[in-house]
């Protein structure tokens, strides 16, 4: 499946529904949907995004998912059955996260607090320290577990899986996502060795 640049641009400002089941233990929070994600209505779906490879490498998921053409029913069953939920700080799709304003990120943080209060996951993992700092007004925050609770959940900041994030490689993403999954009480398998 492919899209032209013009086709992708037609998804600018579109939204993607949250992926949340009745037993969400770990809520991953992306910054906002990319245009490809909006086009196929599947979180972190652009080829080259390292979210699903990191979950697989970290032993959080038993198989590698490829939602680049949208979620298959078995993908949704695996994610939701594992206790994994996915949302975004900002709902509108853009080509790049740096197109968002600080006010949008801050409003998204407030909306996230309402969502967390409603679904009550064990762990909330915000994927992107810069977005976290802006959204929550913690300019010195670092990656890892945060000292405060968030709506009764442990709050973590983990690296963003976008290929644009040069500060993280697949191994470090896998280790970070494994750590938050264990903190959430998700049963993990042995890590998959790197190639």
Image: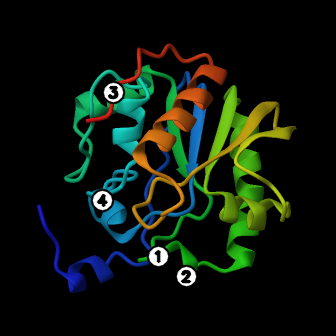
**Marks 3 and 2: CB-CB under 8 Å?**
no
Query: What is the distance, in whole Å, between disc 2 and disc 4 at their CAs?
Result: 18 Å
Colouring scheme, one of rainbow, by chain, secondary structure, one colour: rainbow
Give the mark nearest the N terminus, 2 or 4. Answer: 4
Residue 128, above or below 173: below
Query: What is the distance, in whole Å, between disc 2 and disc 1 at their CAs?
Result: 6 Å
Q: State the residue position of label 3.
A: 193
Q: Nearer the viewer, mark 3 or mark 1?
A: 3
Q: State the residue position of label 4.
A: 46
Closer to the camera in the image, 86 or 195: 195
Q: Residue furthest bottom?
A: 6
Residue 122 horizontal side relative to residue 151, left or right: left
**Marks 2 and 1: CB-CB under 8 Å?**
yes
Give the mark nearest the N terminus, 3 or 4. Answer: 4
Q: Say few, some or many: other residues with alpha carbon within 10 Å of mark 3 (under 14 / 14 to 19 / 20 or more).
A: few
Measured as percent of width and height from the top left, residue 16 is found at 43, 57
Residue at image location 41% in from the left, 14% down from the top: 189
Residue 80 horizontal side relative to residue 71, left or right: right
Mark 3 residue element: loop
Q: Say few, some or many: other residues with alpha carbon within 10 Å of mark 4 (under 14 / 14 to 19 / 20 or more).
A: many
Q: Nearer the viewer, mark 3 or mark 2?
A: 3
Q: State the residue position of label 2.
A: 99
Residue at image location 39% in from the left, 53% down from the top: 44
Give the mark nearest the N terminus, 3 or 1. Answer: 1
Residue 151 horizontal side relative to residue 158, left or right: right
Q: Say few, some or many: other residues with alpha carbon within 10 Å of mark 1 (under 14 / 14 to 19 / 20 or more).
A: few
């Amino acid at each position: 499946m492919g899209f032209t640049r013009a086709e992708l641009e037609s998804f600018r400002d579109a939204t993607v529904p949250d992926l949340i089941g009745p037993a969400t233990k770990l809520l991953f929070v992306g910054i906002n949907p990319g245009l490809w994600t909006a086009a196929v209505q599947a979180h972190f779906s652009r080829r080259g995004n390292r979210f699903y490879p990191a979950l697989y490498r970290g032993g959080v998921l038993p198989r590698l998912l490829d939602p680049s053409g949208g979620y298959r029913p078995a993908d949704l069953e695996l994610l939701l059955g594992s206790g994994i939920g996915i949302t975004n700080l900002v709902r509108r799709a853009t080509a790049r996260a740096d197109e968002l304003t600080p006010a949008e990120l801050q409003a998204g943080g407030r909306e996230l607090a309402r969502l967390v209060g409603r679904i009550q996951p064990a762990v909330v993992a915000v994927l992107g320290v810069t977005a976290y700092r802006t959204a929550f007004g913690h300019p010195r925050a670092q990656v890892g577990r945060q000292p405060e609770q968030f709506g009764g959940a442990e709050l973590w900041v983990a690296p963003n899986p976008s290929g644009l994030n040069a500060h993280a490689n697949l191994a470090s993403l896998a280790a970070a996502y494994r750590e938050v999954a264990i903190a959430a009480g998700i049963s993990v398998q042995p890590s998959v060795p790197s190639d």
